[in-house]
Image (tube, coloured by chain):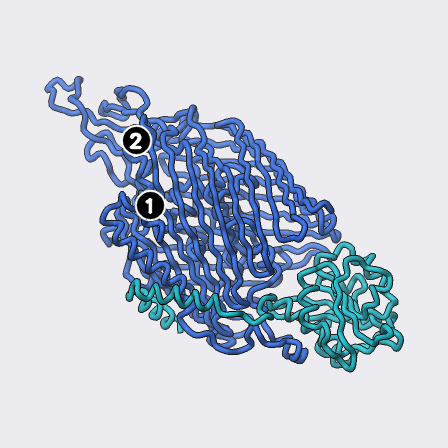
Chain colours: A cyan, B blue
Amino acid sequence: MCHRTDAAVLALAVRGRALLVLALLALGSNAASPAPPDAEVPLELRLKTAFLYNLAKFVDWPPGAFSPDGSLAIGIYGNRVFARAVHDGLDGKEMRGRRVRVRELERLTPDADGCQLVFFDGSCEEQLPQLLAKLSTRAVLTVGECDTFLDRGGIVNFSIEENRIRFDVDPDAAIPCGLKLSSRLLSLARNLRRPRGAR
Amino acid sequence: MKMDCSPAAQGAGSYRESSRGRLGLAILICLAGPLAWPTPGNAGPSRDLTSLELEELMQVRITSASKKQQRLREAPAAIYVLTSADIHRSGATNLPDLLRLVPGLEVARIDASKWAVTARGFNGRFANKLLVLVDGRSVYTPLFSGVYWDVQDVPMEDIDRVEIVRGPGGALYGANAVNGVINVITKRARDTQGGLATALGGSEERFQGLLRYGGQAGDDSWYRVYGKGSRRDNSADLAGAGASDGWIFSQAGFRVDTEPNRRDRLTVQGDFYDGKALGLVNSVFATAPFVRATSDDRSLQGGNLTMRLERRYSVDEDMAAQLYYDRTQRDKPTYRQGLDMIDADFQHRRRYPSRHELIWGAGFRLMADEILSTDILVSLSPTSRDTRIFSAFVQDEYRFPGDKLRLTLGSKVEHNSYTGVEVQPNLRLMWLPDARETVWAAVSRAVRTPARIEDDGRISQRPFAGPKDPTDPAGLRRLTVIPTLVGNRAIDSEELLAREVGWRFEASDRLSLDAAAFYNTYRQLRTLEPAGPAYLEASPAPVHLILPFAASNGADADTWGLELATDWHAAEGLRLRSGCTFLRLSIDPALTSRDATARAPERENPNHQLFLSTYWDMSKDVQLDGHLRWVDALPGLGVPSYLTLDLRLAWKLRPNTELALVGRDLLDASHSEFTPTSLIDTQATQVERGWYGKVTWQF
């Protein structure tokens, strides 16, 4: 394949300027073709969005955790670009009979603005102890993306390993919140964190 | 295409015709690279990922928008990064060869242990406008202004990444970061735990072996130690016969990282080396033949020790303090050159709620040298000198409301022993219209401070026959005239005013483009000007005439250029990268300048360069990588253009064992890349086709 690369390029090169025009035209038309709307959002953000949606499928919230309209509210803290991506990807979708609502959280109120799932951007690492303390007994699934997230009381943490997204789960942290995590979710977690009792 | 209307191109006569064809070829390869095949349809950008199951999501590879690259994308400068994976797949066994895969850099081998490396023009063995740092330690020599690449033998396996910034970095890095800055950053000790052994053998790289072991000491400390040895074969001289330019080198080192708490990291690291490099240099004699090739065989010893404390108060505030000592010793029978350098550096960063991010720092460097020479070619007086640099910098980045526009303003102010106070400000503006696009522009000033050799040196140039010798009774003998560079303490810094624009665009998750253009104006470039009348000198005999020249600031220059890079993940497991570089230099010697060679750099730098790299994962365990490069002719040095190809086939035998077969410079038996002409006349050799096999074993 490598030989083909070089041969192809050389062949293109020797034909000279006529092909240059063609190449420019081809590039021009390539750039001009309308991209699908989703393509505006980088893959990493779309992938994390899909992870949030899929994680929520495997969590049971206690009765009464939801607002009267029965929707599932997802809050994004600390990253406006991601908040927009999640909003575009998930807002209005249906999950297990509930309508998904997405909002950007500029501040974290003690009730997390009624969200059942809150994602904390990696840039919030230093504020995490205060932020997570507010939610430690509320029925909120906390999701983060920094090395110390689970140490500081978070429930699910994303990380990137060999260009793929992985997640760790601390099932113990979910207990005081009244959340039930399905065994399937736990089996897929990389689960570097052992249950506290085992330490 | 506009560049062909430049005065430089018009002045080049017939050369201009061919260069236009080459420009077309260059653009073609850059643009057509990504168009060579249709994109195969698989998990494309439009697919709705939320419909996938968790198991499937975990298999999706993120190819471009990782956090590190995100940070990179937000740099208002022409920055390029080689990651450890790029380095592993490059097949390069030394830093200069690795840098050949960076768009915008000029890398040319002079002999088996000497290279000419720069960005944006003015290349040479002592390319004096490129600053190189290894883990924050400067390896730019203040004696000759340039980098001794023959002692920069960082183990490739230890490098985490190499960050290359083309264009001035004087506002942060200080003097001599004129045309670019290269930062070699090694891995943290905790990332190199366990054992690693590599053995390499082949035709040009005769042998290279590395043994490294990393472990943990206590709960919060990690360490690694390594030893490395290598031997490089002699190459062919310009006539094709065997040359004597081999290179033997051994190096050992360590690194310890301690993280006693969440906010601090203390690093202590050091390297020690001992080697011998062979070569030839054209030496000058007062008797015929006046120029003779003499041994440039040199023994190389040195070491360095660095301590660094990084403290992270919060995401918004951190600081780093660093202290290092570096010693280099280069010895020949007639010439001994030693340099000790101590450097202390501090910097602090804080982001304020008012949308400002302020970085400031201060530094001190002491350089103590001793150069003892009995060589007629090069000597210095005084033989020993201490020079100092005191520096401080401050830089503010302001994010305009809306987070789309950022303005960076900063300057370094330093005082050096040669020219006193130097101020190097820059102004950078960056626009991030969306998550995929970055547009930036910058205006900066940078200076190249004089080298010790320019201040205090004496270098003999090619002699010629002069007037009759008055001491010869027969009146037949002619005096030999030796033009000689003599030190000039009045020499000033070379100055640059650079204007740059750049554009980075992620066209999709698979294709990204990076373009940068610059227009540089240099003032007070170095020229060699007559310095007083010729005088007779009796030693070494016979009596000869010295025609003194002094390094002066006799030329201005304009340079401009364009650098393009593409990165295309063509399919799962197939990645193509390309780079194109266009460069023009137009040098304008002052009316008073008598230096006939002042305009030489115009014809000593490639006007066009391009490369195409393919990285192909043939299966889970087999990789085939190819690097095709074309470098334009250097008419001023008589070096023709060349096309060359490196191939690497690697097979992961077991998860911890890899076999690789690498062929380098495969397209011709040998080719010439650079023949230095200025100041010190090193005898260049040719790069020969070569191959090697390599085993990498982790334990």
Occupied quadrant, residue B357: top right
Q: Nearer the viewer, residue B556 or B153?
A: B556
Q: Is residue A132 above or below residue B529?
A: below
Q: Tell me how far mark 1 sits from mark 2, CA to CA.
A: 24 Å
Work out which quarter of the rendered image holds the C terminus of chain B and state it.
bottom right
The residue singled out by tag 2 in the image is B595
The x and y percentages for residue B696 are 50, 66
Residue type, mark 1 in image: Ser
Mark 1 or mark 2, earlier in chain: 1
Q: Nearer the viewer, residue B606 or B509?
A: B509
Horizontal arrangement in the rendering, residue A110 relative to residue B33 (left or right): right
Is circle 1 on the same chain as circle 2? yes
Q: Residue at x 73, y 64 (%)?
A: A144
Q: Residue at x 81, y 64 (%)?
A: A153
Occupied quadrant, residue B664: bottom left
Judge depth for marks 1 and 2 and give the one in front.
Answer: 1
Is residue A76 something one can see in this rendering? yes
Q: Residue B6 shows which numbered tag?
A: 1
For disc 1, the chain is B
The x and y percentages for residue A179 are 84, 74
